[in-house]
Image (cartoon, helix red, strand yellow):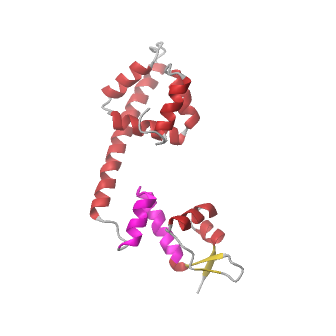
């Protein structure tokens, strides 16, 4: 039987060792056993399970959802897949709205005309015009915060938002607050 150390299995699946330790704590991927020295070891079956976890992650399932899938039949239910498909469609709509807004801003900037000063009121009005509702704005902020936290803060400050309010918006974006 072929076995893998935690580091070797992590490298095989292009993950970090700490990710495997985290999956162990969550009960997603337990080692098949331990060596005489107490080191974790994994088998080919564990590697296949880890690949399935990666496949589900790529499809956008949360770790909680993946744990539920793996503890049941091992196949995601129709309801879960339909929900994730609907959420993905909403994210795509939001991203297309952002793309339209950014393209318009870029056209304005490259046209040589001095753009109007964008403040909070104008920004929210533009998002509304693009069809982005409150949920869409929250998702937009969450993505901005996740991808470029410093840039997110800089953008908020550029809208004339006071620093303490910008920091509250960032905490809200990270899900640390229900409202800002």
The reply to whether residue 16 is visible in this rendering is no
Q: Residue 88: x, y in percent? A: 35, 49
User: Where residue 134 appears, x then y in whole percent?
Assistant: 34, 34
Segment colored magenta: 46-72
- Does residue 147 belong to the magenta stretch? no
The answer to whether residue 113 is left or right of residue 9 is left
Residue 53 appears in the picture as rendered: yes
- The residue depicted at 62 percent of the width and 66 percent of the height is 11
Drawn side of residue 56 relative to residue 130, left or right: right
Q: Is residue 22 above or below residue 36?
A: above
Figure quadrant of the N terminus: bottom right
In terms of secondary structure, what is the magenta stretch mainly?
Answer: helix
Q: Residue at x 48, y 63 (%)?
A: 54
Residue 169 drawn above or below residue 74? above
Q: Is residue 152 left or right of residue 83?
A: right
User: In this view, which residue lies farthest toward the right?
Assistant: 37
Q: Quadrant of the C terminus?
A: top left
**Where is residue 66, by image quadrant?**
bottom left
Count of marks placed on residues: 0
Residue 1 position (above or below residue 24): below
For residue 69, above or below residue 46: above
Q: Position of residue 129 (x, y in %)?
A: 31, 26
**x, y percent for residue 59:** 40, 58
The answer to if 71 sits in the magenta stretch is: yes
């Amino acid at each position: 039987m072929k076995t893998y150390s935690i580091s070797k299995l992590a490298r095989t699946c292009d993950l970090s060792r700490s990710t495997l330790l985290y999956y162990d704590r969550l009960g997603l991927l337990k080692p098949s056993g331990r060596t005489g020295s107490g080191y974790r070891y994994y088998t080919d079956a564990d590697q296949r399970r880890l690949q399935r976890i990666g496949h589900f992650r790529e499809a956008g399932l949360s770790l909680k959802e993946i744990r539920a899938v793996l503890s049941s039949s091992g196949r995601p239910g129709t309801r879960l897949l339909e929900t994730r498909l609907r959420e993905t469609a909403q994210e795509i709509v939001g991203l297309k709205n952002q793309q339209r807004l950014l393209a318009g801003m870029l056209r304005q900037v490259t046209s040589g005309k001095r753009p109007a000063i964008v403040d909070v009121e104008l920004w929210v009005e533009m998002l509304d015009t693009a069809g982005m509702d409150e949920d869409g704005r929250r998702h937009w902020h969450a993505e901005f915060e996740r991808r470029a936290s410093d840039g997110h803060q800089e953008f908020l400050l550029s809208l004339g938002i006071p620093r303490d309010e910008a920091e509250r918006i960032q905490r809200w974006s990270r899900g640390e607050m229900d409202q800002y």
